[in-house]
Image (cartoon, rainbow, N blue to C red):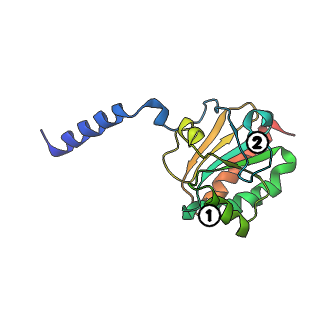
Amino acid sequence: MKVSELFLMMAISAAALVPSAALSLEKGELAPVFVLPDIQEGKPAIDLAALQGKTVYVDFWASWCAPCLRSLPQINELYAEYKERGFEVIAINVDDPIEDGRDFLLDTPLDYLIAADTDNAVLTEYGVIGMPTSFLIDPQGVVRMVHMGFKEKDIEIIEQELVAVLDEFTP
């Protein structure tokens, strides 16, 4: 058996051992609903189901993730531009301790919803395997885009997908 064939067999075997919940949510699937606490204590919980009828960008991030820290302010600019058309953002922080995420927000205030997934339950349910990972969810709750990582040019791709969904669902 060739080394390449052996490697392929090992990769397929390893993939079979990964539970299906660990696989990322895919485009076209219904987004699982969740309720998470706001990252700032004393603020109301953040409920995805309460945003039904809006286009929602769900973004998983951590303070130790350099691409995450670059993307958050750019997503904030998109939010400012499109919120009047029914666009919402939920940035889900997965820091442990959560204070690391709060500290980042002291220096980089954001205008959209910031949730805390302290036990990584939503991270797991969405099948996130790297940071940042984001999901664009249409007003009917269907995932329209899954985006992993972040480079400067990615904001243009995200905006194009966002505008396409907004144009489809809002006048």
The image's mark for residue 69 is 1
Residue occupying image coordinates x 82% and y 57%? 80
**Front of the two marks 2 and 1:** 2
Graded by Cα atoms within 10 Å as few (under 14), some (14 to 19) or many (20 or more), the crowding at tag 2 reads some
Local SS, label 1: helix
Q: Is residue 150 left or right of residue 141?
A: left
Decide if residue 171 is in sight here: yes
Q: Could you say which quadrant of the image residue 110 lies in?
A: bottom right
Q: Position of residue 84 (x, y in %)?
A: 87, 49
Residue occupying image coordinates x 65% and y 38%? 144
Specify the farthest residue to the bottom. 107
Mark 2 or 1, nearer chain start: 2
The image's mark for residue 45 is 2
- As drawn, 133 above or below 1: below
Q: Could you say which quadrant of the image residue 154 lies in?
A: bottom right
Residue occupying image coordinates x 62% and y 65%? 70
Q: Quadrant of the N terminus?
A: top left
Graded by Cα atoms within 10 Å as few (under 14), some (14 to 19) or many (20 or more), the crowding at tag 1 reads some
Q: Position of residue 134 (x, y in %)?
A: 61, 47
Decide if residue 25 is in sight here: no
Residue occupying image coordinates x 74% and y 30%? 140
Q: Position of residue 133 (x, y in %)?
A: 57, 49
What is the three-letter code of the residue carrying label 1? Leu
Local SS, label 2: loop
